[in-house]
Every structure is written in structure tokens, then in C-alpha cells.
Amino acid sequence: MLGFLLQIQTGAIQDTVQDSIDRVSQVVTQAAPVVTEQSMSLLDLLIKGGVVMIPILLLSLLAFYFFFERLIAIRKAAKKNTSFMNNISNMILNMKIEEAKILCSATNTPVSRMISKGIERFGKPINEIEKSVESVGKFEISKLEKNMKILGIVAGIAPMLGFIGTIIGVIKIFYNISLADNISIGLIAGGLYEKMITSASGLIIGVIAYAGYHYLNILLDKVIFNMEDSAIEFMDLLQKKG
């Protein structure tokens, strides 16, 4: 009899506990906010970055423009025309100086302009010809390096602008906290992630500009090597002729 009563009491307690759990779950479910997934486009992210995104975007346009502009010019100069130097050698050995000048004018490359200056000095001392060729070579290299420094400037300025945007955002967050007189996770996190957009954008543009700058330098080194090789070949040719 006692065991039967204990079973009844135990069953009643379990039912009471289960009812309490169901009620609590129902209350929590009703009170919990419904979380909806929100998508955000790239344009929305850029807008949320604030005013600092304007100079960052301008820097990105400058970086892409000058990178591709210099890339086309350097690749064009990097094309090595082996037949050009062979024809120049044959013309000089056969004393066809005027034909060599015409060929240089028609070719229109940094190497041809450098060789053309040396041909114009034909008949003068070797040292004078060599200096003329070197001066033209340096001038051609400086022309190819034109505007490349802008990429280096963008690589340095863009990340700093991004950090400035983040600092401005943090200042605004603390200012809003002082006005609201409370600390809200939503107030801090929402404002902070928006301002971190400027840091991310600045770093991305800076990395792209930095990589582009050094890539162009690698291509330019190949052009310089080609010019030096052609100049040495030309000077050797003059010494043999002399």
C-alpha cells in the first residue's frame, strides 16, 4: 500500500515539473525576438563607411588608372626585337649610317632611341658616344618610371585614411553613449562594425597599390636589362668597327 502511494506521489510530481517546464518554454519562445537574416550589398557597406570612404575611393581610382597605364607602356617597351639589333649591326658594318637612322626612327622604342643617339655621334670618340647613349637610356627609364610613385603614395596613404575613419567612428560611438547615458552592445557593435569598413577598404587598396607598384618595378627591371644589353652590344660593335 505504501509503495502504491509513493508511485502516485512521484507521478504527480513529475507531471507538475513537466507542466512548469512547458510553461517556461512557452514564455521564453514568446519573449524571444525573431531574428531575420539581412543581406547587405557592397554599395551599402561603402555608404556605411562614411565620408572617409570618398578619398579612399578616389585613391583606388588613381591606383588602378596609373597601374594599367604604366603596365601597357612598360610591356610595350619590354618587347625585345632581336632583328632590330641584327639589322643595325649589318648596317653599321656596311657603313649604311643613314639607313640605320631611318630604321631607328621607324622602330620607335626606348632601345631604338638610345641607339639612334649613338649613331648620331658616329665618328666621335667612343667615350663621348657611350655617355650620349647612357644619358638617353637614363631619360627613357625616367619616362617609364613616370607616375609609378603615385602607386607608392596610395599604398601608404590609403591604410592611414582607413584607420582615421575607424578612429572617427569610435569617437562618435562614445559620444552617442554619453548622450544615451547607457552602454548598449547594439550601440557599440553596430557603430564599430560600420567604421571598421574604412579600415578594411584602406588596407585592401593599400595592398593592391603596393603589389602593383612592385610588379611594375619587376617589369621595369627587365626593360633596363634589355636596354643595357643592347647598349653594350652597340658599343662593342663600334669598337670592332673602329
Image (tube, helix red, strand yellow):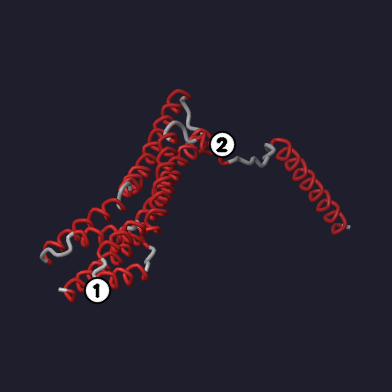
Of helix, strand and loop, which one carries label 2? Answer: helix
From the viewer's perspective, tell me whether residue 173 is left or right of residue 222: right
Q: Is residue 136 above or below residue 185?
A: below
Q: Nearer the viewer, residue 206 or 82?
A: 82
Describe residue 87's horizontal placement relative to residue 236 as left or right. right
Asked if 28 appears above or below 177 in the picture, the reply is below
Q: Residue at x 48, y 36 (%)?
A: 49
- Label ID, residue 93: 1
Q: Quadrant of the C terminus?
A: bottom left
Pinpoint residue 89: horizontal percent, then vertical percent: 28, 72
Lower position in the chain sequence, tag 2 or tag 1 = 2
Q: Amino acid at mark 2?
A: Asp
Up-down relation of residue 154 to residue 94 (above or below) = above
Residue 231, position in %: x, y? 24, 67
Q: Secondary structure at mark 1?
A: helix
Residue 44 numbered mark, or none: 2
Q: Quadrant of residue 102?
A: bottom left
Q: Position of residue 152 (x, y in %)?
A: 32, 49
Viewer-proximal residue among 111 and 6: 111
Tell me where residue 135 appears, x and y as whole percent. Answer: 19, 56
